[in-house]
Image (spheres, helix red, strand yellow):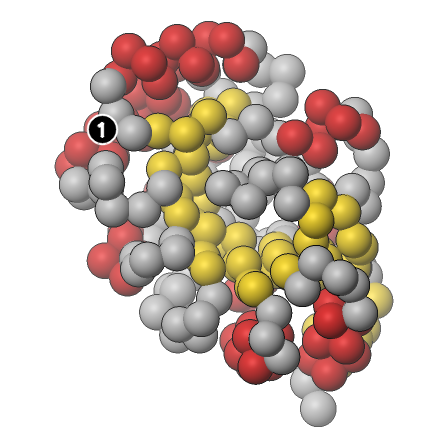
Amino acid sequence: MSLLVCETFYSLLGESTGAGLPAFFIRLAGCNLRCRYCDTTYAYEGGQEMSAGELVQAAGSHPARRVLVTGGEPLLQAGTLPLLASLADAGLTVWLETNGSLPIREVDERVRRILDLKCPGSGMENHNLWENLEQLRTGDEVKFVIMDQSDFAWAVEVIKRHDLAGGVPLLISPVFGAVPPQEAAAWILKSGLPLRLNLQLHKYIWGPETRGV
């Protein structure tokens, strides 16, 4: 039986179109990228070993019946794809947040995938696997974490080049403390595109350094 290295907690979704909703979090350890603004460096390694069965049972014990599998980069662990399928089999609403550097085509079709495309400010732009954009389906979302207006302009160019507007929700997530929300809001309004301002709600509620929320 494959074991997954992770930490778990129950909180509110801080990002995505589900922001503010209660959910069970499975944060899988390990990441193949090193974004300049990373706020979860503790997920690079360590965590508790748990089986998929244990994780499904834990997720299902909460009334929300909603789970986010995140990281690190969750697709690095061999047991992640079976875990996602098992969570969906249990009747849970399942989100997967992935950094966009690994293929998403084999993710169970019942899972809502949040594809985090890396802008130049991350220092990881060259790791984007562009073929993932061809795999997007209803229920998926694309997120751009922006460090400045140049990142926003890059996101707009990518959205136009790949004709993403109107297909799936497009999230603009300003790095906490780097881009004032009012500035990001102004850029979105000026763009004329159907973009969603995606503030990190958990940081405004519990503070930027609080872990496990």
Give the x, y percent position of residue 135: 28, 62
Residue for point 62% across, 30% down: 200
Most foreground residue, 196 or 77: 196
Most foreground residue, 4 or 24: 24
From the viewer's perspective, tell me whether residue 189 is left or right of residue 77.
left
Most foreground residue, 193 or 45: 193
Q: Local crowd at mark 1 within 10 Å, few (<14), some, or many (≥20)?
A: few
Task: Decide: is 18 above or below 152.
Answer: below
Give the x, y percent position of residue 32: 55, 54
**Quadrant of the image for the C terminus?**
top right
Count of numbered labels shown in the rendering: 1
Question: Quick check: can you spot residue 104?
Answer: yes
The residue tagged with tag 1: helix, strand or loop?
Answer: helix
Which of the 4 image quarters holds residue 86? bottom right
Residue for point 55% across, 44% down: 18
**Quadrant of the image for the N terminus?**
bottom right
Task: Decide: is 110 above or below 40.
Answer: below
Residue for point 23% across, 58% down: 134
Inspect the image, locate mark 1, and give the three-letter code of the amino acid beneath it: Glu
Task: Decide: is 157 above or below 71.
Answer: above
Report the residue marked by disc 1.
Answer: 157
